[in-house]
Image (cartoon, grey):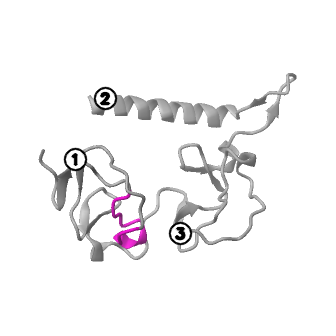
Amino acid sequence: PTCPANMVYSTCTSSCPPKCSVENGKPQDCVYKCNAPGCECQAPFALNEKGDCVPREECSSTPTCPANMVYSTCTSSCPPRCSIDNGKPQDCVYKCNAPGCECLPPFALDDDNNCVPVEECLTNITSTTNITLPNRRGYIFRYIKRTVQKLISIIFLR
């Protein structure tokens, strides 16, 4: 198979390839696991945000983060999550995790690790049967998003 520039085909791709968003593309300690065959960056290249392999020295010292996120050299060990108390801040033992992107306030991580407004998180609306129901607008938005993502993957993987 033919691979894009600065990439090489491998029958066993890395489970943690060098990425500009992780320590500026420096090799990481990694539990070796053989992933599916495919193209991966040749040394000394790393994947940038666009999915291109670039020389590691071209990796920005501050990676670009997805929407509603900011880069931090010390990420939280317990970031706000919709699945935990509807995204409200938690009591947390302060521990500095690896550098990376994390949600800006007032956003929280949803089930797909996207930062969404806290009000779109599941809310505790208790019915007469004491069942916790999702916030309709947030639930419908996430359902449509997942459905579209699955359709796109089905269309492009065939």
Indicate the amino acid at tag 2: Ile
Q: Residue at x 30, y 43 (%)?
A: 36
> Magenta includes 21?
yes
Q: Earlier in the sequence, mark 2 or mark 3?
A: 3
Q: Look at 51% across and 70% down and name the residue there.
A: 99
Are the residues at dot 2 and dot 3 in contact (C-beta closer than 8 Å)? Answer: no
* Res. 98 mark: 3
Q: Secondary structure at mark 3?
A: loop
User: Image height check: is 134 above or below 8?
Assistant: above
The type of residue carrying mark 1 is: Thr
- Report how far apart the C-alphas of labels 3 and 1 lie in the structure: 30 Å
The residue labelled by disc 2 is: 155
The reply, left or right, for residue 49 in relation to residue 73 is left
Q: Nearer the viewer, mark 2 or mark 3?
A: 3
For the record, the magenta segment spans 16-28
- Label 2 element class: helix
The three-letter code of the residue at mark 3 reads Ala
**24 relative position to 77: left or right:** left
Q: Residue furthest top?
A: 129
In the image, which is nearer the foreground, mark 2 or mark 1?
1
Query: Which secondary structure class fits the magenta region best?
Result: loop
Label 2 vs 1, first from the N-terminus: 1
User: Quick one: which residue is furthest to the front in this view?
Assistant: 32
Give the residue at mark 1.
11
Q: Residue furthest right?
A: 128
Q: Position of residue 7 (x, y in %)?
A: 19, 58
Q: Residues within 10 Å of mark 3 (few under 14, many from 20)?
A: some
Which numbered disc flags the more N-terminal residue, 3 or 1?
A: 1
Image spot of residue 39 (x, y percent): 22, 51
